[in-house]
Every structure is written in structure tokens, then in C-alpha cells.
Image (cartoon, coloured by chain):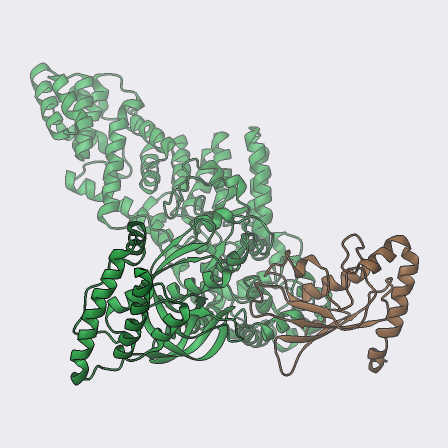
Chain colours: A brown, B green
Amino acid sequence: MAEPVSGITAVPDEHNSRYFHVVVAGPSQSPYDGGMFKLELFLPEEYPMAAPKVRFMTKIYHPNIDKLGRICLDILKDKWSPALQIRTVLLSIQALLSAPNPDDPLENSVAEHWKTNEKSAIDQARQWTQMYAKSSSTNNH
Amino acid sequence: MVDLAREAFSTNNFSLAADIYERTIRENGPTSELFLGLADSLARTGLFAKAFETYTNAYRYGKVTPEKLKHLVTGLIDTVKQDLCNSGNTTTRKNCMFTCGSCRGLLVDPVTIPCGHSFCRKCLERDVSKTCEICNTVHYRLKVRQVKSNVILTNLIEKWFPNECKATQLKKEGNDLFAKMDYKNAIDVYSQAILMAPRDHLLLSNRCHAYTSLDQFQKALDDAEQVVQLRPDWPKGYFRKGRALYGLGGYEDAAVAFLQCLALDQKVSSAKEYLSKALDKILSVLPPDDPKAYALEQRANPTILRQLVDSNFSQKSLLLPDRDIQSTVTDLARIVKDTITTANSFSSEPTPQGPWSSGKQREPGHKCSSENGSGARRKSLSESKQLLNPPEELHHEGVLSQMMTKYNSLPDCSDIDHAELEKKTLPRTHSPLSRKRTRMPSTTQGPLSPTHSSPNKVLKGTTGKDCNDTAAASSDPMGRGASATAATLTSPSGPNSRQTSGMEPERTDIEDLECGLCYRLFFEPVTTPCGHMFCRKCLDRSLDHTVTCPICKGNLAEYLAERRQSVTDAVQTIIEVYFKDEYAERCKVNDEEMIELAKMGGEQQSEVPVFVCTLAFPTIPCPLHIFEPRYRLMVRQCMESGTRQFGMCMHTNDEDGFSDYGVMLEIRDVQYFPDGRSVVDTIGGRRFKVLSRGKRDGYNTAKVEFIMDTVVEPQEMQTVNELQTELHAAVSTWLSKLPAFDQARVIQHFGVLPALDMQISSPNGPQWAWWAVAVLPLDQRVQLAMLCMASLKDRLVALKKVLNYINRRQRR
């Protein structure tokens, strides 16, 4: 780990070198601040010609992330380029936490909440962060 | 008579023309025009000694303008060209690294054109012929404006040649001033730039031009001499020298210089023009104390004439007959050959630490060697030899320390402690390990004054080798990328991290030459029209999926349609020269990959790539439309590795995905569509049984065992052949009963029914039987069952059953 990206770790699975255990810290000045979000990242056979498959394992209240943790992010779909790295993908995901985009929703109810009452939605997201994204990081304290 | 001579001349029958002119002069008496015609004819036959004599006669009898000397010029150039061809020393050029193939200067705004050669954008825009000056490829459709600059080359040059880049900026300023005819200030600016990049021949040449424009010919000549010495292979340098000499009144030397220029590039029209003018001066204007008057009196006396001409040539050996015609031409040939040899053997590459960088290493007294042209030539030849040596030799001892002084400037603050430490352990000596790659990023380069290139600190000693090793170890093939990608996730990339890890120049340097797709050192680097570089194979693979640049998403449809493959010469050479060990390692990895691919299907039991699509049969053609990315890759790998074959299996709905039996397809031809799809013409080969299934690079593979028919026992031979005869006839009947349209389609697709084969020579059995299995309207399961049978007799029996069934149905 010569130059770790701050707030992001990715450790390959000991049994499957294509599978990574990822932890992303919620960005400050976002409702996810203070949370440690677990993700799984899998490199398909076609990688790097096909995008890695990334999914949130920690529950998160976000208009572009659905109940199953699937992420709506263009570079993971049609905007993928083989020149992108895992590192850039994870940074983009972290950025998505800072800038939710309710106009391109994956989880409609959350997006609707965001659009009708942003403050309440953000509160909800903060609550979820407290509820789901804190416990796993106890060993960090 | 004269008409006759003219006609002979115009039909290139020069010796006949000369004969007629001579006779006419004898019979009708001399005139300037006749002498000129005779001289032209002589010149074109290559008899220069006699031609010169005759030209002087022409001058004596009348007014001759320089334009009239064009045949002499043509003749001289022809001789020079001939000499070029004879010596076999055609203008093959060394591979360029940082230099433009056109102006031979450091690349400014480098553009890589489809043939893989790189030029300054300006140089390309100037050349309307669209012909690559290095490989002579004509790029009809090239639109220079639409081609973006080569990003890697631009970055490398900015980083490795910071001073020269600044000098280039100044050159532009100077050129602007020059264009405004403000020669004086232009000279000032050029001079500043020359202080920074004393070995930049373009700067010197431009200053020379400015001096010439101010009629300061001696200064111009000094610059021109340097230009010629720096770049003996650059035609324009000789032209500049010739112009200066011409201005100084040294017409003979000027003529030699112009001829040297034309020997390297016969298209330079201004050199032709000035060669005529110089020759005109030589032949017409004679000083008053010259033996001309005497000569004129003694018209008939050739010795006097010879003296006359001799006295006008300081370069006696060149143009005039002091001995005999033969030796004159030989001398001329020698000078030109010298020029060519020097030019060809001259490696015009600047090295980042080398001759371009430090003005101090200019040998004393190398300036102003104008008094002796051949001496200068000899010197520049030896210099060029020195430059030709591989970099190891170049970077020893003195040169090494010089380059150290240049590139070891202050690193950023975070490194100071480390640097201090090293300074103590390695006080001003250099471990051989540090060899050449001691460049620091240009961001760490201080202000650009010549004095700056004095040693500040001696950086980096023993760390070099270690870095080397890690760089090599981190190379991992793309696609099995777990470890490689893990490494990239954590490894430094981007300019910021580079500064923090600034103590590892070797590592950062090699990163400059890494493919953005596989994170390895470029292998067969290609450049896109958007100026980005990738390994050829990496880009091909990316193009299988999407026709855009992986870095900028620029459209690469044209690149793909033209099926460009040309390696970017400059970067390839840089890698070979500066990253020799890494390149060797990279070649090894590539070879291993190719060997692995080439092994496919080679032995009785082996791993083969599998195309999952349909059933194929031995000896039966199987045309395929390839459009899926993974199969594009598969076909390409089959072709590149030379195996030219892959397995074909039927699709199944179970978890295996494809049938347990299949047939090898041998590729006979591949036709590509502009969008990368292709039609592959294949023919069935060996049958195989799948032992285990695997994957590679996204397509299926299988470990297989090849199936061969058991040899027919002699006692069964008769039964088998009787069956064959009967069934062959039955198939033939079946075919004849088909509607004409269907028959035609069968024949178009599968060919006519093959003849009987009583010898049964092939391990696949007779060809006609496979033809029947492929053509008859059978369920795929039946076909597959027949494919697996290793007994010809069983197969024929099965065929008989289905034929009976089909015939019954056909009768109804």
C-alpha cells in the first residue's frame, strides 16, 4: 500500500483474487459522514474490457443506490473505459455519496423523497448512516 | 544542323547532340549559343571537365545568364544521384526518437501520422505532398489539423528537454520578428535561445538566415558551419552555408555547398537556383589580373584555358580538370559520397543528457573550421561516429558527469533530507548503477539559465537498481488482473504522487511509457489520431468492444477501418534505447504469451479455444461471421500465434454451455469489415472430445482429446465399401430429387457431392460421408451422435438408417 487513497481501502479476497472487500468512508459534509460503507467489488473475466461489478453491502439511503446495494453510475455501465482503474471507480463512488443525483434515480421512493423534501431525506440518510454504517467500524475506534 | 542537335538533346541523346554541336562549331564558327549547347550536352553526358571548358567559351562569346546553366546543374545533380544509387547508400535514415523526420530538430508539437512516424506539426503542415519523409508512404487522406499531438512524446520531451523547450519558445518569437523583417532583434532572440540549446541546429540556421538577410555573411558562415557540423545529414544546412559563402564571394565553395545540399535532397529549388548563380559567377566574372585577357588572346591554347579555370577554383579537386576528366568526376563523387555517408551514418538523436544539453562540452576550436571544407567534413564524420555509439558508451565517464550535472537539480522539499544523506555517502561520484536515467521531472528544474546547469546535488545512487526490479516485477498480463490492479490501486500515479516519490526517477520514468490499459511497458506502441498511445494488442482489444479511445473517448472508426498497425517509431526506439532491460523483459513476457497461444491444439491432448455456435464437420467449409468482441479477439490470437485454428462446439442449454464433442476449424481466410467485424472462411478438421472446460480472455477454452476413426479391419473392408457404394448412390439420388433451387443452394454452400473414397485414407473417414451428414436434413442431435462415432462402419450404418427414413418421407 504505497499510496492509499484516503478513506478507501480495497483488499483482495484470500480465496478469490478477482473479488475485493472494499470499505469507503462517507465523505465529510455529506449525510454519510462518519460512516464506513462496505462494498464488494468483482472483476469479471472480461475485465478490463468490461467494468468491475460493484455493490454496496452496507445499507445506505441514497437515490442512486437501491435496496440490494446496486449502484447507478455511468462509468460502471455504458461509460466504462478500460483505461479506468479500480481506484478511479471507487473514487467516483465516493463522489456519488457527496453528490446524490435524484434526477437519475435507481431507488424511486428515495429519489422522490429527495425531490419533495430534501432536508428530511438527508436526515433519513444520516440516520441510516448511524444505524447501519457505524457498527461495522467499531474496530476502527 | 542546330535543330538536329536540339532534337538529339531533347530526346536525351546527349552524346549525339555533342557531336553535332562540335561539328557545327568546326564548320560554321563559334557562337555563344553553340558553345552553350555543346556544354549542356557534355554536362549531361557527365563530361564535366570538357563541359566547363566549353561553358567558359560560351561566356567569352556572349552573355550567358545563370538560368542558362540549368542543364549543368541537372547534370551535376544527376551524377550525384547516380553516385548515391551506386554506393547503395540510399537515404535510409536512422530511427528518430526526439527528432522530427523533416527538420531534424527536437520535435515541437509532435504529431504521429498513420505510418507511425512523428513530425513537428508545422513541418507536416508545410509539406503539401502528404508523403512521409521517413518511409515515403503517401497519406492521401491525412488531415494534419484533425490529428492531435502525441501526448506521450510531448510529455517526454517537455520533461527530458526543459531547456530546449524554452529555446523553442524563443525560436518562435524570433521567427515572428524575422517575419516582420526585424532581423536585428530576431538575431538577439535567437542568440538567447542558442545559449540555452547550443546544439540546436535549427536555431543556428535561423540566426544564420537572419545574418544573411543583414548581409553579415561572415557571421552567417560561422553559424552555418556549426549547423553543418551538428547535422551533416540536414540538406538545408549546406544551403545556408552556400548562401553565406556566396555572399562572401566564395563562389566555388558555395557551389560545393549547394551541391552537397542537392545531393541530400535534389528537390531544393532554391539551392538549384543558387548553384546556377554561383556557377555563373565562376564562369563569367574574372578578376582583372586574371589570365583571362591572355587566354582570350590565346583562344586556341587549351593549357592557358586550364590555368585560367584553375585559378578560379580554390577547391581544385572538385570542379576542374587539373589532371584528367576521370579524376575530376571521381573527386566530385568522393566529396558527395562523403557528405552522404556522413549524413547517413549520422545519428541525429539528441540524448536528454547528451550533446544538446550542455554548452560546455562543445570542443574548443570546433568553430570556424571554414578554411578547409573537407577537414570540417572529416571532423563531423568522426563526431557522428561518436554519436552513433550505443548509449552505454556515450554515457560513460565525462559525458556521464556532465549529464549528471544537468539533470540533478533541486528536488522538492520532501526529498532534501534524503538527498543530503546521499550527498554524504556519494560525494560527487557516480555509481555505475545510476547509468543514465537520472532525469528529474521538469517541474523540479530551476530557472533556465545556462549557469543553472551546474551541479547542485548528486542524487540517487544505489536505489536505482532496486527500482528497476520492482518495475519489472509489477508487470502482469492484462485480463488476469487481480494482482496487477491491486498494485495500480495503491501505486503512485499522477503528477502529485510523482513528486512525493520523486526519489525514484527510474520508476517514474518508466511510468511515462506505460500503456494505460495493461499498465505495462508499451509493447508495439501505436498512436491514435487523438494522440494517445497503447500497446497495439491492448488497443485492438479495446476496439473489439467499443470504437472509442479508452482515454478520451474520441472516435476511432477511421483508425479501425484502416486497420492501422504501424508502431510509433519514435517511442519504440526510446524504449529500446533507454529502457533496454525492461524492454527485453517485456519482449520475453510477450514471447511467452505467444508461445502459450501457439501451443493450442498442437498435441494429441491439448487446450484449444472454443467457438460456441454450431456443429461443424470434418472437411466441410464453415463460413463464420465474427462480431462478438471475444471472438474477434480469439480469431486475432489464432492468426497472430499462427495456429490458425480453433474448436467449434454446439451451444447447449446445460451449465456446460457447449457440447462434449466438436470439430477443429482451420482458418483459410479472414475478410475484415471497416467496423472490425469479419467473415472468416474456415474448413473442418479434426474431431475432438471435450475433457474439461475453461476460459481465457473472455472466451471458452477446452482441454480436448482428438478423435480418430479406428482402422477398418481387412475382413470388414469389403462390407464397408459395399455400404459406401450403396449409400453414396442413395445420397446422389436424394440430391437429384430435390427441387432445382434447393440443389443449387446445397452445391453453392457445400460444393458437389465428393467422390467415393475406397482407400479410406483419412482418420476422419471418407469426405463424402461428412458431406452427407452436413447436407441431409438431420436433427443436430443425430449429427452430433455421428460426429462422435469412431468407427466408420457404425457411422455408415447410422447413415443408412437415416437415409432410408428420409427417402421414405421424400417419396410421400
Name the image quarter holding the N terminus of chain B: top left
- Residue B668 drawn at (x, y percent): 32, 60
Residue placed furthest toward the front: B812
Whether residue B619 is visible to the viewer of this picture, yes or no, is: no
Whether residue B218 is visible to the viewer of this picture, yes or no, is: yes
- Residue B401 drawn at (x, y percent): 53, 66
Front position in the image: B340 or B310: B340
Front position in the image: B196 or B811: B811
At a point 44% along the width and 46% down the height, the residue shown is: B226
Numbered-mark total? 0
- Residue B700 drawn at (x, y percent): 48, 71
- Residue B805 drawn at (x, y percent): 32, 68
Image vertical order of residue B519 relative to residue B326, above or below: below
At a point 39% along the width and 62% down the height, the residue shown is: B389
Left or right of A79? Residue B140 is left
Name the image quarter holding the C terminus of chain B: bottom left
Left or right of B275? Residue B540 is right
Front position in the image: B748 or B207: B748
Image vertical order of residue A85 relative to residue B277, above or below: below
At a point 80% along the width and 62% down the height, the residue shown is: A97
Image vertical order of residue B153 relative to residue B513, above or below: above
